[in-house]
Amino acid sequence: MAHYVDNAKFLEAIKEYKKEVSLNPKARVPEYIGHCILEIAKRFASRPNFYGYSYKEELISDGVENCLMYLTNFDPNKSSNPFAYYTQICYYAFIRRIQKEKKQSYVKHKLLLEMPYEAFDTSEFDDSELAQSFVTFIQTNSNFDHESFERKIKKTQKPKDTGLEEFMKGNNE
């Protein structure tokens, strides 16, 4: 089987669905379209740049969800390639999911690193060496690059507007 989605048949199904939606906005998505979108998301998730993530199911779910959200946005008058259109939607959904997961990983690792050693002490004895070794283990075995992530966050944050403060300073002097 050379192609897992027949683009011509997929295009016809979308045209029919768009006609149906124009008559009934709450029309159910045909099973064939759903199958095609699911196959696109699954196959796209198996690409080398996405297959190593532990949250692969979330990638696929986000891809399918976004495709269904924008299902009627495809315009057959502008393009005859719905496969490419929905593949692109999956790509951007995957990128957004990866960014969300990286942020969550950053928060988790940052909390672990900033946690006081006493939080690891579960006994009445002095196990500060054990707690210290646990934190050292986390720091050395974490493959998360905190510094580069923090630099990226600082680059994307907008600088605070200090115009009002500067104006107020000028009036007080």
Image (cartoon, rainbow, N blue to C red):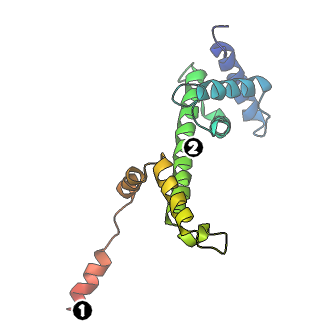
Eyeballing the image, is 83 above or below 132?
Answer: above
Q: Tag 2: residue type?
A: Arg
Taking the spot 68% from the left edge, 7% from the top edge, the residue there is: 1
Q: Position of residue 129 (x, y in %)?
A: 52, 65
Q: Left or right: where does residue 59 sit relative to residue 151?
A: right
Residue 136 in the image: x percent, y percent? 48, 57
Drawn side of residue 163 relative to residue 122, left or right: left
- Amino acid type shown at disc 1: Asn
First reached walking from the N terminus: tag 2 or tag 1: 2
Bin the neighbour count of mark 1 within 10 Å (Cα to Cα): few under 14, some 14-19, many 20 and up. Answer: few
**Front in this rendered view, residue 65 or 10:** 65
Closer to us: 119 or 9: 119
**Secondary structure type for disc 1:** helix
Task: Give me the disc on residue 149.
Answer: none
Residue on which disc 1 sits: 172
Q: Residue 42 sits in which quadrant?
A: top right
Residue, far front: 125
**Relative image position of residue 30 (x, y in whole percent):** 78, 27
Picture quarter with the C terminus = bottom left
Residue that mark 2 sits on:
97
Separation of marks 2 and 1 at Cα, in angstroms: 49 Å
Q: Secondary structure at mark 2?
A: helix
Rendered residue at 78%/37% (across/down): 24
Q: Is residue 164 above or below residue 24?
A: below
Residue 126 can be seen, yes or no: yes
Quadrant in the picture for residue 98: top right
